[in-house]
Image: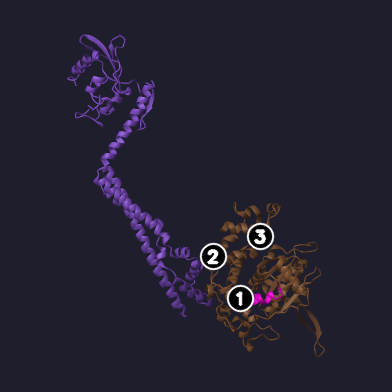
Amino acid sequence: MATGSNGGAGGRSLWDSVDDKSKPSAAGREDRGAETVDLKQVYYQMKNTYADIRREVARVIVGQDDVMEQLLVAIFTDNHALLEGFPGVGKTMIVRTLASIMDLKFRRIQCTPDLMPSDVTGTYIVESDMDGKKRFRFEEGPVFTNILLADEINRATPKSQSALLESMQERQVTLGTMTHKLDKPFFVLATQNPIEMEGTYPLPEAQVDRFLLKIIVGYPSMAEEERIVELYSGDFTPTVNKILRKEHVMAIQDLAKKMPISADVKDYALRIVSQTRPTGKNTASHYLDFGASPRASIGLVLAGKARALLNGKNYVGRDDIKAMAFPVLRHRIILNFESERKGMSTDDVITQILKDTG
Amino acid sequence: MDNPDVKVETLNKKIGEVAFYSWSFFLYYILLDFLVAFLLGALIAQFIGISLVLPVIFAVVFAFFRLIQKRKAVDIISKLAGKYENLDERLETAIEYKGTRNVIVEDLLGDVSKRMDMVETSTFLDYPLMRKRVVTLVVLCFLLLAVSVLNLRTAAFNALDFAINSVNMGDTLNKVMNGETGTVFDTLTGNRWEESNWSNDKDKNKVGAQSGGNRPGISEGPLPGSGSGTGGEGPKDIYGTASSASIQGKDVDFKLHPEYGGDIEIHETGGTPQANKFNLEDVSSVEECVDCVVGPEHEEMVRRYFEKILPES
C-alpha cells in the first residue's frame, strides 16, 4: 500500500462489490451489520472510496474540501456535526449531496420557533382499522431516518431542541410507554448561522457538547465562486452517483474504531484537551472561562482515527489529531472577556494551545 | 507474509538487529570515553606524581556514569524515529499493537516490516562523536608521552615558580620605587602583609641571583645562594637602608639599589655623595664593570671592601 495506505486495490468500487441480495431493501429499516460486507475489502479500498466521494461531491459542491472531510469524519465515527456558516454558502447542499452519495435515507427539518417536539419525533394518531375499530398508530417523525438535516437548529425552541438532542444521544424515541429505536446509522447534521440572532435560542453548552464536530463553512475563494456561478447560472441540474451503501458506512465505522493509535499520540490528544482548561498561567487561563470536557478527549481521538482511515493511513498520527482539534474543540471552549476584548476567536485560542502543546 | 504472526516475528527480528548494533555502538562510545578519562587522569597523575591506580578508578567511575546517563540514548524506537521520519509514529504504533489482530494492524505490521528493510544500521554510528573522541585520544597520548619522556614536569614547575616569583618581585619593586613602603600587599597565595621597609623577611624568599636571598633560584651560581649576578649572602640589609663600614679608618655609607640595575652609592658618613653611581647596565662581568664604569679613584676602595667582607660569608 502506498504510504501504508489502504488504497491499493483498484477496480470495482465498493458499491459494485456488494451482491444484490445484500443491497438495501426499499424499506431500508433492517439493521444490516458490518458483517455483511468484507471489512478487508472496505479497508483496502478506503482511499479509492474517499477519492470517489470527493469526485462526486465536486460535481455539485465547489471547494469546501475540509468541510467534506469533517462531515465524513463525523459520519464515520457515528456522531453528529453542527455546521455553522453564513446563509448561502452551501451548508444544506453539502449535507444533501453527501446523503445522496451514501444511499442513506435523508430528511430535513426546517427549525422554526413554532416547531413542536412531535414534529421531530412523530406522534400517535387515531385511525380506524378494517373493522371500524379505532386504534392508535405511531406516525414516525423526520427523526426516523439515517441522515437528518436540522436546518437552523437555533431557531427551534429549547423544548424541540431537547426532543431532537435526546434522540441524538439515546438513538431512540420514547412516546408514552413505547420506545422506538432509530435507524442505524443515524446522524444529525445541524446548521446554524452566526448572524440574525434575534428570535433564536442558542443551544446550551451541554447540548452543543453532543455534537462531535462544529464545522465552519466559510466563503469560497474567488476562483471557486467563479466556478459556482458558472455551474449554477445555467440550466445545470446537479446529480451524483452513489458510492457507499449503508452497510459500507457501518463497516467503515467499525474500521475507524479499530484504527490503532500509539500511546504517544493519544497522550498528545489528551494534553491538547487538558490545555484548554484554565489552570495556573496557561493560555486557557488568559483567554478561556471554561475548557473542554473528557467527551472532547474521546471525540478528538475518535475523529483522529476516522481522519487517518479516510486518508488511507494505517495508524493515527499527530497531524490527524492536530487537524481535528479545531472542529472538536471550538464549540467546547468558552471565551472569556479578555479574549473577546482582543477580538480573538475560539480558533485563535486553539491555535495558541496547539503551539503550547508542541 | 500474510500471516500476522510472521509479520510480527519479522518486525521483532529487524528491531532486534537494530538494537544489537545500536548497543554495540553505544558500548564502543563508552569505551572511548573510558580511554579518554583514563588518559586525562594519567596525564594529571604523571604531572603531580601520584599513583596510576587513581586514574583507572576515575575512568571506571566516569564510564559507569556515562553508561547510566546515556542509556536512554539507546531507545531504539526513538533512534529509528529520529533517523527515519516515515517510521516514527508508524513504528511506535506497530510495536504497541503487535499483539492485536485486525485488518488495519496486520496491514500496519506488514508495512512497518517492509520499511524496516530500508533501515541501515550504519546510520546509527555517530561519526562526529567518534571523530572527536579519537582525536582527543591521540592528543592525550601525545601529551602523556611528552610528559613522561621529556620530563616536562620539572620544566613546567620551574617555569611556574619563575613566573610566580617574577610577579611578586616586580609588584613589590614597583611599589617600593613609588615610595609605597608601609603599603599593604596582597600575595599570590591570598595572604596580606604590610611592607614595613625594604629590609625584611621577604628578601629571604627571593632567588639568590636577584637579591642575595637564601633560597636557591634560577641562574644561581655554584654556591647555593650566590647568584651569577651581584648577589651573595652578605649583610642582609646591604640593599636596604644605608649601611656603614669602616674602610681604611674612614666610615663610609653604602647604599645599593638593585631596583635601578645595580647602582651603588658610596659616600662618607654624614658627608655628601662622592662619585656615586656605578652603572652596571650592559656589563657582563665585574672586571669589565670596574674597568669601564667605576672611576679609578674608587677602584681601590671597592676592592678592599669586598675583600674584607668576603671571608665573613
> What is the distance, in whole Å, between disc 3 and disc 2 at their CAs?
21 Å
At label 2, which amino acid type do we have?
A: Val
Residue at 63%, 89% in the rendered image:
A21
Disc 2 marks which residue?
A: A265
Judge the density around disc 2: few (<14), some (14-19), many (≥20) Cα neighbours within 10 Å.
many
Q: Secondary structure at mark 3?
A: helix
In front: mark 3 or mark 2? 3
Camera-nearest residue between B208 and B296: B296
C-beta proximity under 8 Å, tags 1 and 3: no
Disc 1 marks which residue?
A: A253
At label 3, which amino acid type do we have?
A: Asp
Q: Residue furthest right?
A: A132
Residue at 25%, 31% in the rendered image:
B217
At label 1, which amino acid type do we have?
A: Gln
Give the drawing colour for chain B: purple
| Mark sitting earlier along the chain (1/2) | 1
Q: Secondary structure at mark 2?
A: helix
Disc 3 marks which residue?
A: A347
Q: Where residue B34 appears, x then y in whole percent? A: 33, 54
> What is the distance, in whole Å, between disc 1 and disc 3 at their CAs?
28 Å
Q: Quadrant of residue B211?
A: top left
- Relative side of B229 to A275, left or right: left
Q: Where residue A275 appears, x then y in whole percent? A: 59, 58
| Mark sitting earlier along the chain (3/2) | 2
Which range of residues does the magenta coloring cover?
Answer: A52-61
Q: Who's brown, chain-wise?
A: A
Chain ID of residue with mark 3:
A
Camera-nearest residue between B45 and B104: B45
